[in-house]
């Protein structure tokens, strides 16, 4: 090797090391960003998911579980966001419940990061922003943007075919890391299966009456602006849908969970526990394949000219115009749908009533924005602060 | 089953580290600058996985 060759190799090697360091730092910072949660007056206890399945203790998916208890006994609702961590309205709606809701009767249990591992990585080759910031009067709060799937750093490699347990149904290989294809899970399975098993144990042990999974969907996906319900929840979901559409000014439909499509929360929670399982879908143009620029502005504004163009050509299952689907609209749909679920559940089940107050609703979100309802962690005492 | 999965994962990390070592070897032995750049570009994602960064 000549001196010139050596010099060139050292130069190229140093450049590659610099690229590796910059990229590695970016990935490390994203994975380890701590998101503060101010415990609202309704939160009486914070535990972790490993209480329900010790095999996930110490893993990325040992998520916080927030318990809000009323003074009077009643039923129990479980709301979880972040099943798909690339759908932020679900996480943010759950966030507002923890920071604001209070219970008069019954209990509300909330998870903000159902697949916490998925919130520590973004979609490969999709150019997602690593984080997004919600503006607030006190400066703004930054959240991790995530992926649909468990981080490969936490579960790897993927099989050729994912065989769902216990149905034996063949699913796409990558769905082995999809929390919403791995229910009801198993105690000794993959990390994703152990996580769903922990949620099932939570639902069974805490005697959850109604479980609500918060999602967002691309407008090219037919299951959108809707409540997907297990057959046990048909009357409940239909009444929620009619009431929201009539009283709150936004349309939300109802669909029934297919009996032979396995792994999804609306199917498996209903099948493997006494709980009624519901899944709410809000529209998120950022996820559409026809989107243009992929950045945090589009994620939060829900505005994209190419998705609008697709709508004009009749390619979408939800309406969109230049105003888009802003994050406040999407979060408000979820918070109102949760609040309405608790009210309707209580109307139908007086002996298992769940009465909650101070949940910001759709009109509140449209008027004030999401940031108005995020509490300043600097003003909170340490014993009323948690981190996701 | 958890143990079996851990063994498979460790085996994959060993394979990844082995591939990274081969890429470094090829980079050192490469005669043209185009080859050197190619090996380094391919090496980066292997190292990010071995270091558990991505």
Image: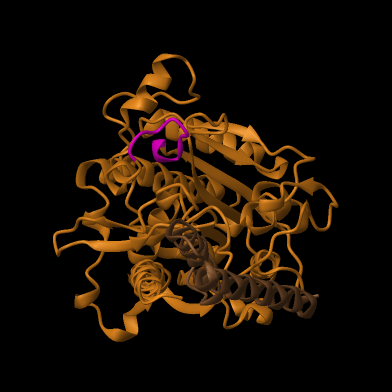
Chain colours: A orange, B brown
Q: x, y percentage for residue A238?
A: 58, 34
Task: From the viewer's perspective, tell me whether residue A201 is left or right of residue A105.
Answer: right
Q: x, y percentage for residue B23?
A: 57, 69
Q: x, y percentage for residue A152?
A: 59, 65
A362 is higher (above) or lower (below) than A69: above
A65 within the magenta span: no
A74 is higher (above) or lower (below) than A258: below
Give A221 or A174, whichever is nearer the viewer: A174
Residue at horizontal 81 percent and vertical 75 percent from the top? B1
A288 within the magenta span: yes
Give the residue furthest to the front: A2
Residue at horizontal 57 percent and vertical 74 percent from the top? B25
Task: From the viewer's perspective, tell me whether residue B30 is left or right of residue A9.
Answer: right
Residue at horizontal 66 percent and vertical 82 percent from the top? A54
Q: Main secondary structure of the magenta part?
A: loop
Q: Which residues are magenta?
A: A285-293
Give A79 or A355, whichever is nearer the viewer: A79
Residue A106 seen in the figure: no
Residue A312 seen in the figure: yes
Task: From the viewer's perspective, tell me whether residue A107 is left or right of residue A367.
Answer: right
Give A23 or A87, whichever is nearer the viewer: A23
Give A291 or A230, whichever is nearer the viewer: A291
A196 is higher (above) or lower (below) than A3: above
Q: x, y percentage for residue A315?
A: 49, 20
State which quadrant residue A188 falls in: bottom right
């Amino acid at each position: 090797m000549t001196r010139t060759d050596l010099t060139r190799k050292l130069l190229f090697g140093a450049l590659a090391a610099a690229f590796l360091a910059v990229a590695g730092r970016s990935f490390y910072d994203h994975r380890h960003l701590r998101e503060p949660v101010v415990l609202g007056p309704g939160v009486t206890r914070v535990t972790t998911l490993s209480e329900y399945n010790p095999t996930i203790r110490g893993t990325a998916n040992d998520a916080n579980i927030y318990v809000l208890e009323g003074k009077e006994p009643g039923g129990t609702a479980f709301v979880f966001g972040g099943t798909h961590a690339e759908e932020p309205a679900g996480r943010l709606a759950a966030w507002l419940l923890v920071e604001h809701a209070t219970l008069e009767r019954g209990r509300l249990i909330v998870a903000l990061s159902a697949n916490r591992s998925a919130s520590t990585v973004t979609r490969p080759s999709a150019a997602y922003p690593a984080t997004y910031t919600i503006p607030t009067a006190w400066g703004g709060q930054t959240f991790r943007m995530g992926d649909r799937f468990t981080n490969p750093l936490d579960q790897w490699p993927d099989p050729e075919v994912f065989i769902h347990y216990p149905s034996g149904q063949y699913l796409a290989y990558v769905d082995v890391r999809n929390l919403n294809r791995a229910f009801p899970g198993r105690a000794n399975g993959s990390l994703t299966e152990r996580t769903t098993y922990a949620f099932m144990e939570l639902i069974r042990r805490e005697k959850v009456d109604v479980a609500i999974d918060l999602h967002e969907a691309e407008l090219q996906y037919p299951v959108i602006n809707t409540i997907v319900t297990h057959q046990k929840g048909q009357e409940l979901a239909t009444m929620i849908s009619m009431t929201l559409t009539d009283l709150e000014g936004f349309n939300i439909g109802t669909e029934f969970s297919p009996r032979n499509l396995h792994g999804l929360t609306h199917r498996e929670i209903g099948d493997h526990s006494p709980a009624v399982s519901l899944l709410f879908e809000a529209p998120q143009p950022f996820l559409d394949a026809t989107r243009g620029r992929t950045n945090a502005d589009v994620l939060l504004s829900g505005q994209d000219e190419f998705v609008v163009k697709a709508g004009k050509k009749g390619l979408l299952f939800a309406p969109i115009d230049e105003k888009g689907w802003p994050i406040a609209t999407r979060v408000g749909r979820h918070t109102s749908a949760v609040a309405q679920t608790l009210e309707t559940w209580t109307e139908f089940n007086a002996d298992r009533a769940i009465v909650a107050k101070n949940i910001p609703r759709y009109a509140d979100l449209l008027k004030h924005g999401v940031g108005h309802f995020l509490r300043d962690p600097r003003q909170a005492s340490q014993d009323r602060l948690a981190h996701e | 089953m958890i143990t079996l999965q851990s063994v498979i994962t460790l085996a994959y990390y060993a394979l990844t580290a082995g591939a990274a070592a081969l890429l470094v070897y090829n980079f050192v032995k490469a005669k043209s600058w185009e080859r050197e750049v190619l090996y380094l570009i391919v090496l980066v994602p292997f190292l990010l996985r071995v270091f558990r960064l991505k």
